[in-house]
Image: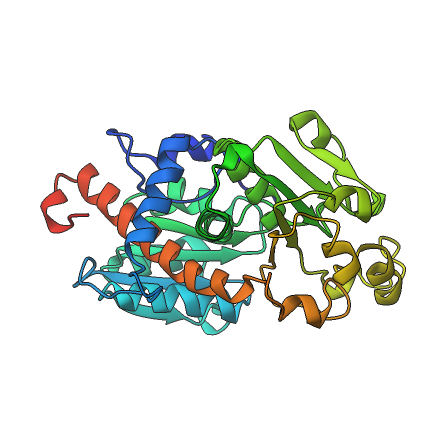
Amino acid sequence: MHLAALHTPSQIQLNQDGHLKHFITIEGLSKETLTKILDTAHSFINDQNQLVTNNLLEGRTVMNLFFENSTRTRTTFEAAAKRLSANVLNIDIARSSTSKGETLRDTLWNLEAMAADIFVVRHSSSGAAHFIAQTVCPHVAIINAGDGRHAHPTQAMLDMLTIRRETKKPFEELSVAIIGDIKHSRVARSDVAALQTLGCKDIRLIGPNTLLPVGFDDYGVRMFNKMDDGVADCDVIIALRIQNERIESPALSSQLEFYKMYGLDERRLALAKPNCIVMHPGPMNRGVEIASSIADGPQSVILHQVTNGIAVRMAVLALSMQGQLQEKGLIEAVSL
């Protein structure tokens, strides 16, 4: 079910002063807003590349509402909130009142009444976070931790922070290749939107026709069926995870065949620029999307993405809380 059918997410993500109060999707946000998120995230990493801790959200309550499992994303949001001194509650939705017949709307209203300040929402339905932000709990900051095939905005922003910190080049000068199941990937969709907003002019999507979206080449990206052509002279390669349900389905013949055609190995990486960085949103299928020698090699920044992910989630939590407080005339409680 697609829930995002009311106002566009960009219309509800910003408060009257143009500051972030929800973070639902990259699409519709300005370069200035994305740069603010990146700059704020960067401020949470010190000169030794270690995450800092402060009390920006002291006394605030962050609730992780994961209707779809993702231990990695939930854990990094929890780490981010705790580094900002927030109270964190992980709500077991599978055992909540919704499993006993209570509506989602009533469950969320009850959680809001428990003095929640921020909901981090992951859901299998596209538009779920938008629906909650607009129609259920507009006075709670809603952070989208992934919804259906629609968006994964914090993953995109941690990817952008990693690219900015590791390449040290303007986005306008970069060539970025994204490989794998583009068609079903909310990460790919959000990455493309973020790259375009930040000025990247050479975005390449690589995969078999069955896993490439129709019409994406109308949006300023280039589509490649041949891996060698797609990665040639790239600055950044992002390998996407192939979900188990795609393997040995009509969309994909086998793991072995996919690795043969689209796996990132040493020969293919050598076609990119010598200082090309390699990224992956995780968890990785070694020997399917990427060779272990590449995942663990000197050009891999995959573990850096994890650290940057906590910093980005700290930034989004802090900025959205600031935006909500501005909306309520209580901005003195948070200062960035």
Residue 265 visible in the snapshot: no
**Where residue 206 sits: x, y (%)?**
75, 45
Number of disc labels: 0
* Nearer the observer, 53 or 182: 53
Residue 321 appears left or right of 307: left
> Farthest front residue?
274
Residue 91 visible in the snapshot: yes
* Nearer the observer, 147 or 200: 200
> Farthest left residue?
332
Q: Is residue 153 above or below residue 172?
A: below
**Where residue 91 sits: x, y (%)?**
40, 69
Which of the 4 quarters of the picture holds residue 33?
top left
**Where residue 76 sits: x, y (%)?**
42, 66
Q: How is the image coloured?
A: rainbow
Residue 311 appears left or right of 160: left
The residue drawn where x is 79% and y is 58% is 267
The residue drawn where x is 28% and y is 53% is 43
The residue drawn where x is 73% and y is 51% is 181
Q: Is residue 307 above or below residue 227?
A: below
Residue 250 appears left or right of 43: right
Residue 194 appears left or right of 260: left
* Nearer the observer, 323 or 159: 159
The residue drawn where x is 76% and y is 36% is 223
**Where residue 105 sits: x, y (%)?**
41, 52
